[in-house]
Image (cartoon, rainbow, N blue to C red):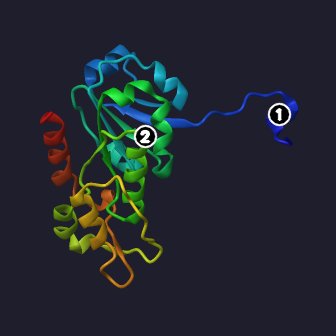
Amino acid sequence: SGRLETITGLREDRPKCRFRVLDPELRAQLGGQGDISTPIDDLTYLSLDIRTVVIVENLQTALACGDLPGTLVLFGAGFHAPSLAIVPWLHHVRLLYWGDIDAAGFEILNAIRSVFPHAESFGMDDTTLLSHRDLWVPDPKQRKAELTRLSTNEIATYRLLFEAKEGIRLEQERLSWDVVWPLLRQRINSA
């Protein structure tokens, strides 16, 4: 092919992921490093006692997370999140996906479950959606999809998004951090 790397023999840049180690003891094992960007395939070599991984759709949410024992937060970069399937240890930890409450967020959750069937959703429910009506924005570009890997409750929330004329969405970064952070901590600590 005519790619520069092929023509010149240079190494190609590999797909990357960004993550934060939320456990201070685990950060200490990494020389204090807690906010890391690495090629996804290098993530396979991470050898820490991680019990929970939270995949978030928005970088601002990943950056806002505080300390949590045994926890790592991954910036999932939307539809790229299923590419994390090559990381073997992710198949054996508790995995939470927290996306926007919009059509794309549920499509991403469905795609993640195609490679991580054990993934749980967080904050993508009708209670969160309906209690934050003042934060809804129109979503005229949304499209309906056949999402076979969602729970009954998730499907019900997904359908609510299409009831308004232009569709609706609730972006996770619009939620009050004072409200959602304690809920996330409680959910993780309940394991």
Q: Nearer the viewer, residue 9 or 79?
A: 79
Residue at the spot of label 1: 6
Report whether residue 39 is seen.
no
Q: Nearer the viewer, residue 146 or 109?
A: 146
**Residue 48, relative to residue 183: is it above or below?**
above
Q: Nearer the viewer, residue 119 or 152?
A: 152
Residue 26's image quarter? top left
**Residue 78, relative to residue 187: is it above or below?**
below
Report helix, strand or loop for mark 2: helix
Residue 125, image x and y in percent?
A: 22, 59
Characterize the local packing of mark 1: few (<14), some (14-19) or many (20 or more) Cα atoms within 10 angstroms: few
Residue 180, image x and y in percent?
A: 19, 51
Position of the C terminus by quadrant? top left
The label shown at residue 51 is none
Report helix, strand or loop for mark 1: helix
Cα distance in 3D space between marks 1 and 2: 31 Å
Q: Residue at x 47, y 23 (%)?
A: 44
Labels 1 and 2: the sequence-earlier one: 1
Q: Residue at x 15, y 45 (%)?
A: 182
**Residue 128, relative to residue 2: is it above or below?**
below
Disc 1 residue type (three-letter): Thr
Describe residue 159's horizontal placement relative to residue 141 as left or right. Answer: left
Position of the N terminus by quadrant? top right
Disc 2 residue type (three-letter): Val
Report whether residue 78 is seen.
yes
The label shown at residue 115 is 2
Characterize the local packing of mark 2: few (<14), some (14-19) or many (20 or more) Cα atoms within 10 angstroms: some
**Residue 49, relative to residue 113: is it above or below?**
above
Residue 174, image x and y in percent?
A: 30, 61
Residue 170's image quarter? bottom left
User: Which one is in front in this view, the residue at disc 1 or the one at disc 2?
Assistant: 2
Residue 132, image x and y in percent?
A: 20, 68
